[in-house]
Image (spheres, rainbow, N blue to C red):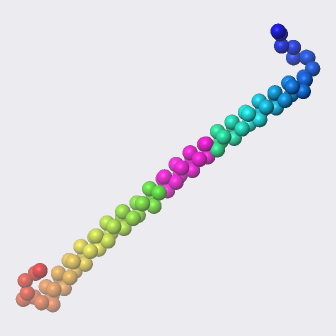
Amino acid sequence: MEDDRNAPATKGDLADQETRIVDRLTEAIRDAQTEVLKAFYGFAESNRQRLAQPEGNQGAIIARIGVLEDRMLELERKINFPQQPPQ
């Protein structure tokens, strides 16, 4: 049967077309939602890594400050008690 573009549309034709449009719109919305979620998860991961970095740096800084404090204490002992051997 040949498709006649000039033939009048029936209510069934219009209902079928509406269903196809709704289905395509639903699919487009789901695709957009998926893309937004992917972008959000990518942002969340990079943000988590960015926030974790200072914690690691903070640990390194605390360790370095501890070493400096030990060295300062050793110098103070040498100055205040020059006759005692270093500990």
Q: Does 11 lie within the magenta span?
A: no
Q: Is residue 6 left or right of residue 34?
A: right
What residue occupies the far top of the structure in this picture? 1
Q: Quadrant of the C terminus?
A: bottom left
Q: Please state which of residues 76 and 45 is positioned toward the viewer in this rendering.
A: 45
What residue occupies the far front of the structure in this picture? 12
Residue depicted at x 49% and y 56%: 47
Place of residue 61 in the rendered image (x, y in percent of width and height, measured from the top left): 33, 69
What residue occupies the far bottom of the structure in this picture? 80
* Figure check: 43 above or below 28: below
**Magenta-highlighted residues:** 34-47
Residue depicted at x 83% and y 13%: 3
Q: Is residue 26 left or right of residue 46?
A: right
Place of residue 5 in the rendered image (x, y in percent of width and height, measured from the top left): 87, 17
Q: Quadrant of the N terminus?
A: top right
Q: Main secondary structure of the magenta part?
A: helix
Q: Please state which of residues 69 and 34 is positioned toward the viewer in this rendering.
A: 34
Q: Is residue 85 left or right of residue 23?
A: left
Q: Please state which of residues 23 and 79 is positioned toward the viewer in this rendering.
A: 23
